[in-house]
Amino acid sequence: MKIFVQCNYKLLDCGEFEKLEQIDDIIIRRPALQAEWKRKLGNDIWQQYQAKFDYTQNEWTTIPEINLPYFVCNNLTFELRLSSNRQIGIFPEQLTNWQWLKKVISKANRPLNILNGFAYTGASTLFASAEETTLTHVDASSSSVNWAKQNCRLSNLENTNIRWIVDDIISFLTREVKRGKVYDGIILDPPAFGRGKKSSIWKIGRDLPKLMKLVDKLLSNDPEFVILSCHDKDYGKRELRDELTKLQSLKTSRIETLDLTIKSKTGNDLPAGKCARWKK
Ligand SMILES: C[S@@+](CC[C@H](N)C(=O)[O-])C[C@H]1O[C@@H](n2cnc3c(N)ncnc32)[C@H](O)[C@@H]1O
């Protein structure tokens, strides 16, 4: 079964520590520190942006009265915002995981209880939503969770069974273990560094082992999938695979690893993280 995901997003080019992206007719230029190479497209194209994050000033500059389009992917709609942390509300490198999730969930053909941790604006949550599926969306930032709820409304999925949780992932999952909750599918995309609730700090090197121990306790007797992705240079495909290999609840070792890369038809591709994923 092939499931295609089509979006109104294009990576036009990347290089010299920046990326140039197009969503509908709006061109956005922002930092991409991993893009150490020369650009493929000329300066004339790179100057055609309507919004640019200037990292020397640490702020966005835009043409007057810019109207940001929605990011639309299949039947899902996401609001874009020019955030002060240079993000715009979507991580297109996750497209391969969105496609994979849809396929695995539809093949399972049974009600699933799914957890999405570090869930941000809800792209993986909404891609995982299916009839009879229960989703738990966890993020420490209340504004990200509100943004995800807005994306859920825009995508006409208000009737989907989603628990919206604003909490630190470790605190929340520790409570879920005590409550005896279990999940058939778990999606995790931890940042290298992040802020939990009440000034707690997430550090991947320190906290990922703790998180994975909780994950092991939370997987059901018949889990369907686990996705672990990240953008930290210390976590390559081998390290992420090792984290999944340690999970006792995954009885088989069907783990696949991949580079999360945003492809460009006109310019350079952009490597944007690594991923390990397991399915039954
Ligand atoms: C890289 S983004 C995740 C992107 C998302 N998976 C997607 O594809 O759209 C990281 C998210 O982790 C959240 N976060 C950081 N530290 C956290 C913590 N300790 N507990 C829960 N969420 C946290 C941030 O608020 C942010 O929304």
Image (tube, helix red, strand yellow):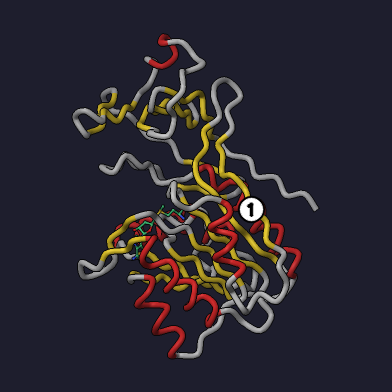
In the displayed structure image, the side of residue 117 where residue 76 appears, left or right: right
Q: Which residue is mark 1?
A: 257
Q: Classify the position of ligand 1 by quadrant: top left, top right, bottom left or bottom right.
A: bottom left
Q: Secondary structure at mark 1?
A: strand
Q: Which x, y percent locates residue 181?
A: 51, 85
Q: Quadrant of residue 119?
A: bottom left
Q: Which residue reaches farthest bottom?
A: 179
In the displayed structure image, the side of residue 225 where residue 39 appears, left or right: left
Vertical comparison of 42 with 4: above or below = above
Vertical comparison of 156 with 208: above or below = above
In the displayed structure image, the side of residue 170 where residue 269 appears, left or right: right
User: Which residue is drawn at the image coordinates 28% and 26% (left, top)?
Assistant: 62
Taking depth in this image into account, of 194 and 203 the one nearest to the observer is: 203
Amino acid type, callout 1:
Thr
The answer to whether residue 57 of the structure is visible from this angle is yes
Instruction: Decide: few, some or many residues near mark 1? Use Cα within 10 Å; few <14, some 14-19, many ≥20.
Output: some
User: Which residue is drawn at the image coordinates 32% and 65% (left, top)?
Assistant: 140
Q: How many marks?
A: 1
